[in-house]
Image: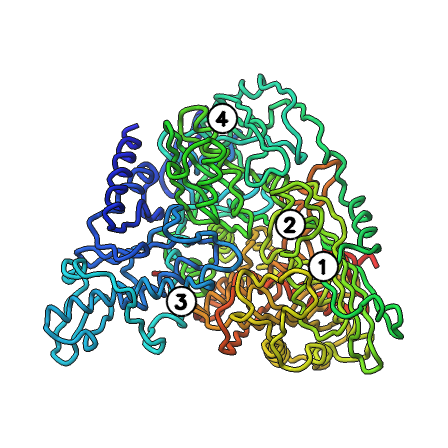
Amino acid sequence: MAIKLTVNGAPRTYDGDPAQPLLWYLRDELGLTGTKFGCGIAACGACTLHVNGTAVQSCVVPMSAAANGKVTTIEGLSEKGNHPVQQAWAAANVPQCGYCQPGQMMAAAALIKKKGKPTEADVDEAMSLVICRCGTYTRIREAIKAAAGMTPAASTTGGR
Amino acid sequence: MATTEKTLQRRDFLGKLAQTGLVIAIGASSVRRLEAADRLERGLLNAPDGAWAPGVFLRIADDGTVTIICHRSEMGQGIRTGMAMVIADELGCDFKAIVLEQALGNDKYGSQNTDGSTSMRNGAYDTMRQAGAVARTLLEDAAAAEWGVAASTVSTRNGIVSHTASGRSLPFGKLVARARTLPVPAKPRLKDESQFTMIGKTVPGIDLTDMLTGKAIYGQDATMPGMKIAVILHPPVYGSKVASFDASAALKIKGVEQVIEVPGAPPPSGFMPLGGLAVIASSTWAAIKGREALKVTWSASPNDKYDSAVYRTELEGAVRAEGKTVRSLGDAPGALASAGKKIEAEYYAPHIAHAPMEPPAAVASVTGDTCEVWTCTQNPQAARDTVAGFLKLKPENVAVHVTLLGGAFGRKSKPDYVAEAAFLSQKIGKPVKVVWTREDDLGVGYPHTVSMQRIEAAMDASGKITAWRHRIASPPIPSVFAPGQDYHSEGELALGVLDMPYEIPNVRVEAGKAPAHVRIGWFRSVSNVPQAFAVSSFMDELAHAAGKDPLEFLMQSLGSDRIIDMTKTGSLKPVDNYGAKWEDHPNDTARHKRVLQAVAREAGWGRKLPKGEGMGIAVHRSFLTYVASVVHVKVGPKGKITIPRVDIAMDCGYAVHPERVRSQCEGAVIMSISNAMTSELSFKAGKAVQTNLNAYKVVRMAQAPREIKVHLVNSGGPMGGVGEPGVPPVAPALANAIFAATGKRLRTLPIGDQLAKA
């Protein structure tokens, strides 16, 4: 009955409650706390990550549904923290409190992968699943364009 | 256990050191650099590393490493970066090499209450400069003595002290041994502001890389070895308690270990827990499932009938009758009675919730009579005192470490969740993490006040306001702390009502009775939210009634450029000025006008817009800062509102990190649009109706303005707040824009789909 999956490239076996959401498996059992808890009902998107390359809200994905899946979290988005989305986020100095930003970046990375150069409507649709209470939306929009190569990387600052 | 023993030994050691007069930053530690398993231990042990500590805010080690201690909480406002910038710039060290530690709650830092937009204003800027200058003065003196030159001829840069004339230089580390023998100067040599290389410029955020790679640690992420998870079923109605319960189904769930009743403080509950049933489990999921399986009967509460729709009519009744006079200038009732042109309107703003993306959380470990806590708190000293009070421990035995805060907005000033964790740890003898779910956060938090306001005004033929009566019925924050607090307090009325800047000869402010039925909490910019909405909406109504352009009307109504004498505005008690003296931070009409003119110019105020579009404008002073906003709206044929652009002009005086001031303004715009357009926390039968983010609405990407343009106006005034003052003027500017676009005046928040229904 054990569930097999890979998390950020590493094979994992899980034999606990198959109804436990992927979010809590990652946070409580693997210590991967980059994926955040915000609502538990897929209403806020803080827990967004990739299963088989698609953005999903991990707070409502039971472990049974992640079986044989390839899970990528913010910790595994890039080896050196230099995914184009992460670079664009740094250049636009997007984060304020930073709590929702893993979910924002995972949603944005999946969007760009799927659409290449997303339209404004694409951005509205995909990114409206992830709430930012600090209100970084205009910077996120700008960063997505830069990450998708639609505009030169902006402006403000870079990571330390 | 070993950890605790070491902890206690260490604390004794530090206590003795402190008695000898050597000041060391006790236990401050950089959470982000520590592995979960040893965070607690190292957090307490790594501080006294032999480094030189010429004050509580920084240390310099023999290898030259500069450690800066940030005593305010990071919740998105960038204070960890801002404070480090000030100290580092004044010290002259390499910013990129700084080790930043987060302070524990400790009175030696002064206030750590990260609240009221005070972290940089209120002298913190001067304190940080002083801290950097003390260390630099001593290092320069040490180098000067070493080289036999005058101290005035040496200087610091990038962690090196140099004597330019002779070409000699030494890194900080080589001077520590000598510097630490010198007496700490009472008056260190402060740099001239023109010498700053970082302040005023854009600096990479200290926590940026961690935030982008998932390494940043928030309260929900904190762990302690061997900890259990607790999820608490709180009483859904304020004042209710557990009458009886059946935990048998919960205890059958795999991973659930215990169910423990948490005692609650009866109203007014202050910062103390509400009580309820805690499910202790080996995992968060088991604790959540366990809570769902609990069966409980709650005791009756005087708040069982609280119903927002009914309460609104009560508040309407209160503002339609004479209230308790708080301010009386001239004879407003008389002037209104005899007025030719009289206008009146009522405005309603519902409860709103902070809804930080990170729900509250705390991990605590109680051993004997000591307690260690890691939590997302805006106020570690209050958290410490609340834990000490709830558990009957000595405050000095409670160590509160502060993680990053995943948003806060006032919610995390109230440490009830920290006391819950400490209580449960004491009860089970193991570390416990209390995880608040979103249902807790929205259902049993500290909602922002609900407000009904009625304003009546008279104007003469020239459009000059001759009389103004403002009645407010809104449950006050003091009701959380003391019984019988049924009127909006003077302190809350000072937020946009008692300090209202318009030149009007007859003004009356009255507070109507508004008993609280929930824990009323302060929310980003506090009562400025509803009060700026009412005042700035009403000013727009008056402008249109007078047949004037709203900008022109605001400029005219502000009157001559002047400092308003706040002792002569008719307030019955002295008017609070965000804790500052009026002579230091006057209410200056010229600064109001300057931000108005700036925002109008930048937004293209007055230009012709297509049908269905409109611009609205508002200005508001709060937290000693002046802000004006122009909102541009587009209203579709079915009443759908979109916001192509918001302009916001802020005069906060001197800005340490203008880039972060801009991002704070952008965030304030979004939050204010949430307040105006979407957010409402309502109650029925005493319970919150919207208990998750599917029902409690906040602005998402698609509803956000396409563009936010921030204009910083520095008119040379003293430093004001930044985090909050951007919020108040945006909501009324939005409502005013909708009026400009449609001719419909919306006086009830949230605006929601009122236009579509109209």
Q: Which residue is depicted at the point 69% across and 80% down? A: B559
Q: For residue A153, say whether it is visible.
A: no
Q: Are marks 3 and 2 on the same chain?
A: no
Q: Nearer the viewer, mark 2 or mark 1?
A: 1
User: Mark number for residue B280?
Assistant: 4
Q: Nearer the viewer, residue A92 or B555?
A: B555
Q: Is residue B65 above or below residue B257?
A: below
Label 2 and label 4: CA atoms lie apart by: 31 Å
Q: Which residue is depicted at the point 68% across and 26% down? A: B299
* Neighbourhood count class around disc 2 (C-alpha, 10 Å): few under 14, some 14–19, many 20 upward: many
Q: Provide residue B740's location: percent of width, then percent of height.
A: 76, 72
The residue wearing badge 1 is B326
The residue wearing badge 2 is B448
Kind of residue at badge 1: Val
Q: Where, quadrant-wise, is the N terminus of chain B in this rendering?
A: top left
Q: Provide residue B580's location: percent of width, then percent of height.
A: 52, 64
Label 3 and label 2: CA atoms lie apart by: 35 Å
- Indicate the chain on which mark 1 is placed: B
Say which element carries label 4. Answer: strand
Label 4 and label 3: CA atoms lie apart by: 44 Å
- Indicate the chain on which mark 3 is placed: A
Kind of residue at badge 3: Thr
Q: Nearer the viewer, mark 1 or mark 4?
A: 1
The residue wearing badge 3 is A157
Q: Nearer the viewer, mark 3 or mark 2?
A: 2
Say which element carries label 3. Answer: loop
* Neighbourhood count class around disc 4 (C-alpha, 10 Å): few under 14, some 14–19, many 20 upward: many
